Amino acid sequence: MRTLQEIADTYPNLIFQNDGYEYINKSLLTAEELQAIEEVTSILKSKIKYFTKFFNFKKRKSGELDVRFDGYYDMAGFQGVYYINIKEVDEAKPWREEAADAT
């Protein structure tokens, strides 16, 4: 499995400097880029318990990339946007429900 950094490097159109509620225009993406979004989604589902939807990678002033996605804030179902450094996600171990239930 590729890392998120490898995917971002391979598909630079997934890096989007959104301003507020702007999103990537998926109708302009290639079939390969759309498949890469599915791969990113699979990775994020395996590593982030509260993940719901991937939007884009975003470059910070430092040059590092963040992952922008929607996720649950609480068990009542409220969702919001998260930005997490791509390296932190790549280095995270997969989330497993059994491990979460044990805590």
Image (cartoon, grey):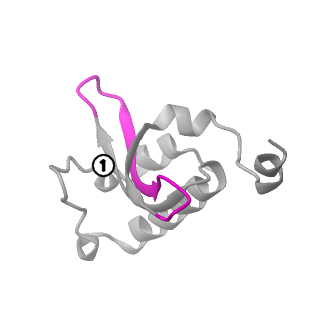
Q: Report crowding for label 1: few under 14, some 14 to 19, many 20 or more residues within 10 A (C-alpha).
A: some
Q: Can you name the residue that lies furthest to the top here?
A: 62
Q: Which residues make up the magenta segment?
A: 60-77
- The location of residue 3, given as percent across then percent down, is 57, 44
Give the amino acid type for the residue marked by disc 1 in the picture: Ile
- The location of residue 55, given as percent across then percent down, is 36, 59
Asked if residue 29 lies left or right of residue 78, the reply is left
Asked if residue 67 lies left or right of residue 75, the reply is left
**Secondary element at tag 1:** loop
Q: Residue 64 colored magenta?
A: yes
Q: Residue at x 55, y 39 (%)?
A: 89
> Is residue 29 shown above or below 1?
below
Q: List the residue tagged with mark 1.
A: 15
Q: Residue at x 23, y 62 (%)?
A: 23
Quadrant in the rendering for residue 80: bottom left
Q: Residue at x 51, y 54 (%)?
A: 74
Q: As rendered, which of 37 and 10 lies closer to the eye?
A: 37
- The location of residue 30, given as percent across then percent down, is 34, 71
Q: Residue at x 41, y 43 (%)?
A: 9
Q: Can you name the residue that lies furthest to the left here?
A: 19
Q: As rendered, which of 93 and 32 lies closer to the eye?
A: 93
- The location of residue 67, given as percent across then percent down, is 41, 45
Quadrant in the rendering for residue 27: bottom left
In the rendered view of the protein, which quadrant contains the C terminus?
top right
Q: Residue 87 colored magenta?
A: no
> Is residue 66 shown above or below 32?
above
